[in-house]
Amino acid sequence: MANQFDAFFEGQKKAFDFWSDTSKKIMGNLTEPFEEKTEKEDFLSSWFASQKKIWEGAMMFDDLKKVYDKTPEKLGEWAKLQTEFAQGWMEFYTKNAERLGVKLPTVNGTAPSDFFSRTPKEWSEWVEQANQWWQDKLMMKLPFPQDFHFKNFNELYQNMYQLWGPMQRMVEHGIDNWKAIDVFIKPEEYQKIIAKFVGMKPITDVSAMLGQVNEMFSQSAGWMEDFAAGTKDIQAQWKMMGENMGAWTPGHALQVVLSLNETLQEGMDSMYNVAGRNKEVEMARMIKDIQFMYTAFVLRTAEMQGKVMEVGRYALPDTIRFFSEKRKEGKELPDFESFFNEYVNILEKYMIEVFESKEYSLMQNEVAKAGVTVKSKMDQLVELAFSDFPFLMKSHADEIAIENRALRKKIRSLEQRMTALEAADSNHTPATPGNGAADELLSGIGRASAAQKDNLQQIRGIGPKLEVMLNSLGIFTFEQLSKMTKKHYEMMDELLDAFQGRGFRDEWAKQAKTLFSNKNHNEKS
Amino acid sequence: MSDTITDQLVEQVNTATEALRNISEIHDVDIATTPREVVWEDGKVKLYHFQRETAPVAKTPVLVSYALVNRWEMMDLQPNRSFIRKLLSEGIDVYIIDWGYATRFDRYKTMEDYILGNISDCVDFVREHHQMDAINLLGVCQGGTFSLIYASLFPEKIKNLITLVTPVEFDIDEGLLFRWARDLDVDALVDGFNGVVPGDFLNTGFDLLKPMGKTRKYMAMPSTTKDKSRLMNFLRMEKWVADSPDQAGETYRRFIKEMYQQNKLAKGEFILGGQRVDLSRITMPILTIYAKSDHIVPPAATKPINDLVGSGDKELLEFPGGHIGVFVGGRSQKLLTPAIAKWLIERDQ
């Protein structure tokens, strides 16, 4: 008897430690001083003390019969105390959790402060909702598109968990034949699970999907043909589509937004009049092309998915077999987590085997190709519809990109050339030795060194780059340039392969002569 | 696993309490926090210089050329596990090229533009800034392939070369990417995507290399969220993974065709800007680092670098981990970055 009470107190102490630890953590995180600290610590201590008192009270009787008689009463007292405590603590927790910025999830709109009165079903609902709450919080912190993957995983885990009941029994009874498993777990459900694992949109019913695709495209192509035949008023059609898109019921405060929307709508009307006009036949033809491309895409995707599903379906029976064998060896039944872990490992192994095959690699390429073909044809369709608009289209952007590319190449070659010339200049090696043409030019106009350098940019027509180029030939002074004749200009043009005829046209010699004489004059005076 | 239902419940509530608090406390997921300044830029491409408080031990700076796929922030994901920060603290002066985000206007940007344009400009900038004839170059993954090409064309400008998980031998059967790329109709793909290959498309491929990778990561979520630093690591990594730039079509087309499909670089047949790229012209000291369990660039793709270069001073270094672990793992901090710094300092004279 006493031993049982000891065990019971042990449990109580554990719970007491847990609650008081959690409370301390909350208190510790409050930035403001915690006013009710003493009171709450007392609350926890008095809870523990009251419990002790109840049980000590129950054990005081020396007659065992009395103890038995009093037990229901004492149990009642204890249960009441527990409920009071739980409620008190939850209020305390709720109040302070809010101060911390932690919002507690609610079940059906009520705070979870009365959780002892809940049924196990309500409890599990609460846990589920709390779980959902933190998942949502976490999702908000995740960047796009990782949040999508996370959501996908959660659904997957839930789906698998729903199958856990039958799977457990299959392990227990060693049912590892996939045909038998199909009876308990529908292949479509299972297919959805595998598709989620790899982030595919599962095509479970190819013909149904193709039916939808065909209907969708035929309808669009039909519209275009109708427009072309003039059987429907194109303006009215587009307007209707536009209005449908913009239709919504505004609240009182949203009148301004609505009127803005109407203004925009009116502005758009003229656009709808022109979009696609006179191109209906061509557009209808393109839509039909896309229809078949899309069909090919669906079929190839289904084929590729089928390949993965084919091996994927063996992963579950093999996982069941794995744990059945273990059970035969006397091991315990796995919990859901270990089962799920092992299943994931086996499934991955099988998938990689498929991925490594040439067949899959080729299929994957076909799917990617079919997908981008649809996409690019859709782009063309949109461009065609809006080709009469003053919009910058993707193909226009491409023209700019080509131009951009050419300019980049040109700049690079000029930069390289300039670097070479600058290097030549800084080395003071006017006219590369052995360069007969430059030598001949310099023998005509005279030689000079970088030390004698005039500011050649004073001459109209000579900029910084040209000056560097002239220097590289060994031309540094006004005096040299003043001696240039038509013959020398031609030699220079040939040497520099640039600025053809500019020196002659801008009369560098004449300008240089003036600058040279000014320079002399200034130096003398 | 705990014994009783009560214990399990207590554990669950405890975990949930921690998770609630941790998630509520996170406002910003910050990455790439090492102070840096832009010292050069050309359009979308930027050159960063990381700031140091002390003079570097090695006087020759190192220029990092990251891959075009994904972002360089991987090398500075979080302060206590930052490859860059560690390199700085080991006494190295670090520059890195940020390729920016390619858009439609970059669809015709070629490998010449990247290597002979951007890398060349950055190397020249750093050389001029430090008044040195040659600087150190560290190439990461595809950025390493680019670095090898650059160094073989301009060996006089590179003092020491380091390649990290860099593919050069593409004719291998290890690694799904290498198998798949061989069957890829890259023309149809680049044209179909109108010249800009979406980053998400590449990510789908990377995800499939370890089809259950995401599942395992999410399975660990309950224990991840109860530990704030682990939760931050997770969120930083997620942020990095999701930030995948689109690829300039012409460069992608050429890289797939001439590297993955024709293995031209290793065969000595690759031509850039009219010049044949001969890896044996690389004669400076070279350190080739590969990751033992790399499923993206397997060792077989990386190790041949050591045989193809003409350097006398060459070294192969195996990292015990995967492609990403090279940059973010604890072992990277303990083993790899100090080894790189030591190797550079020894060859600084």
Image (cartoon, helix red, strand yellow):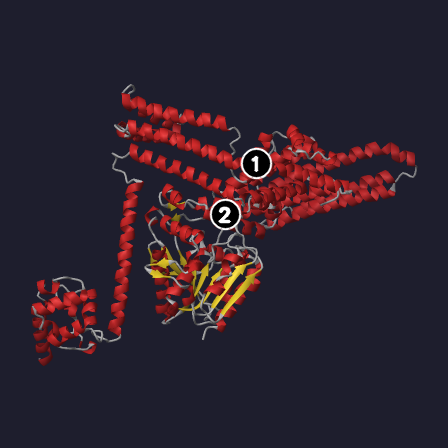
Residue situated in front as seen by the camera: A62 or B312: B312
Question: Regarding mark 2 in the picture, which secondary structure is present there?
Answer: helix
Q: Position of residue A95 (x, y in %)?
A: 60, 41
Q: Give the residue displayed 40% in from the left and 47% down from the top.
A: B246
Image quarter where the C terminus of chain B lies is bottom left
Identity, as a three-letter code, of the amino acid under mark 1 = Met
Task: Residue lying at the far bottom in this picture: please name it.
Answer: A524
Image quarter where the N terminus of chain B lies is top right
Q: Position of residue A161 (x, y in %)?
A: 64, 35
The picture quadrant where one finds residue A330 is top right
Would you name the residue on which mark 2 appears?
B206
The picture quadrant where one finds residue A229 is top left
Residue situated in front as seen by the camera: A301 or B9: A301
Q: Position of residue A283 (x, y in %)?
A: 31, 29
Disc 2 and disc 1: Cα gap in Å? 20 Å
Would you name the residue on which mark 1 appears?
A309
